[in-house]
Image (cartoon, rainbow, N blue to C red):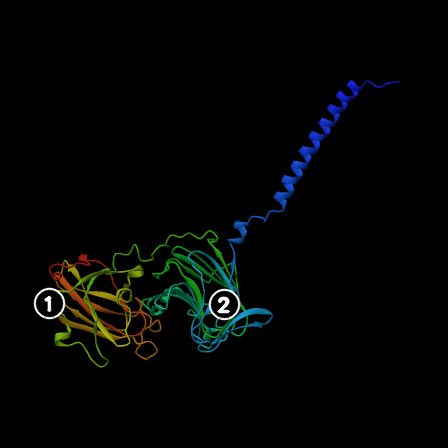
Amino acid sequence: MKRNITNITYYEIIKYATITKLFLVTFCMLVYYSSYAWQAPEKDTSVADSIIKIPMEAPYWQNDSARITFEQHDTKNTLHLLPNAGLAIAKDINFSDGTITFDWKPIDTMFASFYFRYQSKMESECVYLRTMREGQMLAYDAIQYSPIIKGVNIWDLLGYYQGPADFKKRSWNQVKLVITGKQMQVFVNDMVKPILQIPYLEGNATLGTLAFEGEAYIANLIIKPNAVEGLTPQAGIDPTANDPRYLRKWWVNEPVSFPFGREPVGDDIPKEKKDWKDIEAERRGLINLTRPYGIEKERRLVWIKTGIRSATDQSKRLDFGFSDEVWVIMNGSHLYTDKNYYGQSIMKEPKGRCSIENTFFNLPLKKGDNELLIGVANNFYGWGIVARLQDLVDIEAINYIADIKN
């Protein structure tokens, strides 16, 4: 029997057209997804950018002494700081906020230091171990935070930023720092409980690299930018903020060279009303002379003054801390002289630090305005004073200057 060519052609056309369409759609989809699958995967920035591992390899570190090596030690890839190596500085790092962890095997018999937000030897933040305190669980100065300001480690002005630490020399210790804005927590071996809680980072630097100092091995250095474990960036409370007894506003003149052995006499004591600048206390009532003036190798002398208005003639106790030498003059008459040399028998408690605990003396106040003038000399680390009246009974004003300032 003959086939109906017209009908066959029509149905075959429909069938073949449908098959062809399905084939083309399938082919196009396969080509599209195949080409997409072979594209290089996009970088997972949520993971990759949150962890920076700094290799313990020479191209990633700077050191001016050529006394650092990179080696396998205890199965770890390590940076080894040899004795007197100076600073080992991580290259191309700009750290501000986040978490820093590393393994630390200190060998140095005195200090092992870690710097962050490091800009130069002039400006940085620092945490260090006093390695001679190893195993002394009640040593209140085993670990300390201190900024570097104008090239000066002001540890002796910040005795409240130190504490005990459970660490070992010549053994590995795990260290973690959580840093954000003005606050920091430091963990050593115990990653749950911080051993230092710093409510106010005192340094001028807010961004910089990392560095190590002191004979040690360093391994597994990791940065997690912006991972701050819920720590707030705002400064914590100043414990003295609500205490009105502190003398917080002073006037200061420019420091002058003042060789050892000299005591202020005659023309050394300012008499003219000129060249005075305002200076105000930082946290805890500290007049920090290091911040404006830094330090010199030679001893320098600076004068500061403030006023107290008394309702009566009276004697008022002044609790006083200082670094390192002071000459106190009240209403033009010499009142008190003292030294606070760290490491010498004359140093004050607590162990030569500038502290409100250092000493006290009585101010003979007359009714009306009184001028308190203090000469401060220093050439050893931090430079400053802190002063607090015992009470404000019959005191009408403090931090008061009537006509003694220009």
Label 2 crowd bin: few (<14), some (14–19), many (20+), radius 10 Å: few
- Helix, strand or loop at disc 1? loop
Image quarter for residue 334?
bottom left
Residue 142 x/y as whole percent = 44, 70
Q: Which residue is drawn at 29% across and 60% down?
A: 282
Q: How crowded is mark 1: few (under 14 residues within 10 Å), some or many (20 or more)?
A: few
Q: Where is residue 231 in the image (x, y as percent from the top left)?
A: 44, 53
Furthest residue to the bottom?
261
Residue 259, how many percent across, how many down? 22, 79
Q: Does residue 394 appear anywhere in the picture?
A: no
Whether residue 19 is visible, yes or no, is: yes
Q: Quadrant of residue 197?
A: bottom left
For the N terminus, give its image quadrant.
top right
Query: For the C terminus, which image quadrant?
Result: bottom left
Looking at the rendered structure, which numbered label has been put on residue 350? none
Residues 296 and 290: in front is 296
Three-letter residue code for mark 1: Glu
Q: Which quarter of the figure has residue 341? A: bottom left
Which residue is pictured at 20% across the width and 80% down the height? 262
Q: Nearer the viewer, residue 19 or 153?
A: 19
Q: In this view, does 37 lie to the left or right of 356?
A: right
Q: Which of marks 2 and 1 is in front?
A: 2
What label sits on residue 272 in the rendered view? 1
- Compare residues 172 and 164 and report the one nearer the observer: 172
Write the residue at 19% across / 78% down. 263
Residue 156 x %, y %: 34, 70
Amino acid type at image mark 2: Pro
Give the mark, 2 or 1, whose residue is nearer the N terminus: 2
Residue 59, disc: 2
